[in-house]
Image (cartoon, helix red, strand yellow):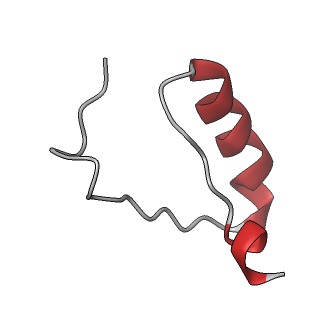
Amino acid sequence: MVTLIDSNQERIFVLYGSGYLHLLLQFIKESGLFDVKLANDYLN
């Protein structure tokens, strides 16, 4: 289990270069430990 925050009110912002984004998202989504939100989902 991964514990990076203490409450549901806290958020983590991760900024990566586009060359690594595909791999980062794949690892995170496949782990099932995180709820991934992309900035584009809110900016478009």
Whole-percent x and y of residue 11? Answer: 35, 59
Kindly give the residue lying farthest to the left in the view shown. Answer: 6
- Give the number of callouts: 0
- Note whether 5 is above or below 41 in the view shown: above
Residue 41 falls left or right of residue 44: left
- Note whether 33 is above or below 41 in the view shown: above
| Residue situated in front as seen by the camera: 20 or 41 | 41
Q: Please state, as top left, top right, bottom left or bottom right, where the C terminus lies in the image.
A: bottom right
Kindly give the residue lying farthest to the front in the view shown. Answer: 9
Residue 4 falls left or right of residue 12: left
Whole-percent x and y of residue 25? Answer: 69, 42
- Note whether 18 is above or below 36 in the view shown: below
Whole-percent x and y of residue 27? Answer: 64, 30
- Note whether 6 is above or below 37 in the view shown: above
User: Measuring 28% from the left and 48% from the top, which residue is drawn there?
Assistant: 8
User: Measuring 79% from the left and 60% from the top, which residue is drawn there?
Assistant: 19
Kindly give the residue lying farthest to the bottom in the view shown. Answer: 43
Q: In the picture, residue 6 is in which quadrant? A: top left
User: Measuring 73% from the left and 54% from the top, which residue is drawn there?
Assistant: 21
Q: Please state, as top left, top right, bottom left or bottom right, where the N terminus lies in the image.
A: top left
